Image (cartoon, grey):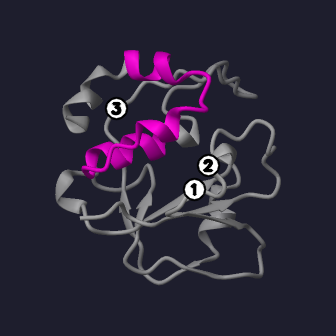
Amino acid sequence: MSCPHVLILRDYRESTKKCSLMPLRGTPGIEFRRYKGDRMLDGAGRILLHHEGPELTPEDAGRDILLLDSSWKRLPSLLRTVQGEPIRRSLPKLITAYPREGRVVKNPDGGLASVEALYAALCILGYPKPEWLGHYYFSEAFLGKNKWLERYSS
């Protein structure tokens, strides 16, 4: 089985310099789309990585992935442009290595760098792509904090 196609919808307000996914531009199997409020995106049948959904499992393999790259605040705006019925799946508990600062809460729990979320999802689905973390400065720390992902990559 080949790796699923990954469609990334990026919020134009997010900094490309800080985006953990931008080094993956041009990678076969990954497509970037820029969010525009009047442009619809077909998400039918894709796994939508979303915090409100059943946990992703290896049984979800075989479906393409939709990743929304935005702040939590802007997520509802991006979701309104997704048509069809994507399959919402959440990730198991993971610990980010990215030193995040929330505006209200310093280093808020529950968030991941987008590349961390994508890598974890692919591992769980049976398509580990360690090379996709190759550019990520915090990759060693992320993998060290989430050693349980190793069971999916062997």
Lower sequence index among marks 1 and 3: 1
138 vs 20: above or below: above
Horizontal placement of 30 versus 44: left or right?
right
- The residue depicted at 28 percent of the width and 31 percent of the height is 149
5 vs 127: above or below: below
- The residue depicted at 47 percent of the width and 38 percent of the height is 131
Q: Quick one: 96 or 17, which is closer to the camera?
A: 17
Residue 52, percent from left and from top = 41, 54
Name the front one of labels 1 and 3. 1
**What is the crowding at mark 1: few (fewer than 14 residues within 10 Å), some, or many (at least 20)?**
few
> Which quadrant of the figure has residue 134?
top right
Q: Please say if the residues under marks 3 and 2 sit with CB atoms less than 8 Å apart.
A: no
**What is the crowding at mark 2: few (fewer than 14 residues within 10 Å), some, or many (at least 20)?**
some
Q: Please say if the residues under marks 1 and 3 sit with CB atoms less than 8 Å apart.
A: no
Residue 57, percent from left and from top = 22, 51
Q: CA distance from mark 3 to mark 2?
A: 24 Å
Q: Which span of residues is magenta-colored?
A: 117-144
Can you tell which mark lies on residue 27? 1
Q: Quick one: 123 or 102, which is closer to the camera?
A: 123
The dominant secondary structure in magenta is helix
Amino acid beneath label 1? Thr
Q: Secondary structure at mark 1?
A: loop
Q: What residue did someone put label 2 on? A: 24
Q: CA distance from mark 2 to mark 1?
A: 5 Å
Amino acid beneath label 2? Leu
Q: CA distance from mark 1 to mark 3?
A: 27 Å
Q: What residue did someone put label 3 on? A: 93
Quadrant of the snapshot with the N terminus: bottom left
- The residue depicted at 31 percent of the width and 38 percent of the height is 92
> Which quadrant of the figure has residue 130?
top left
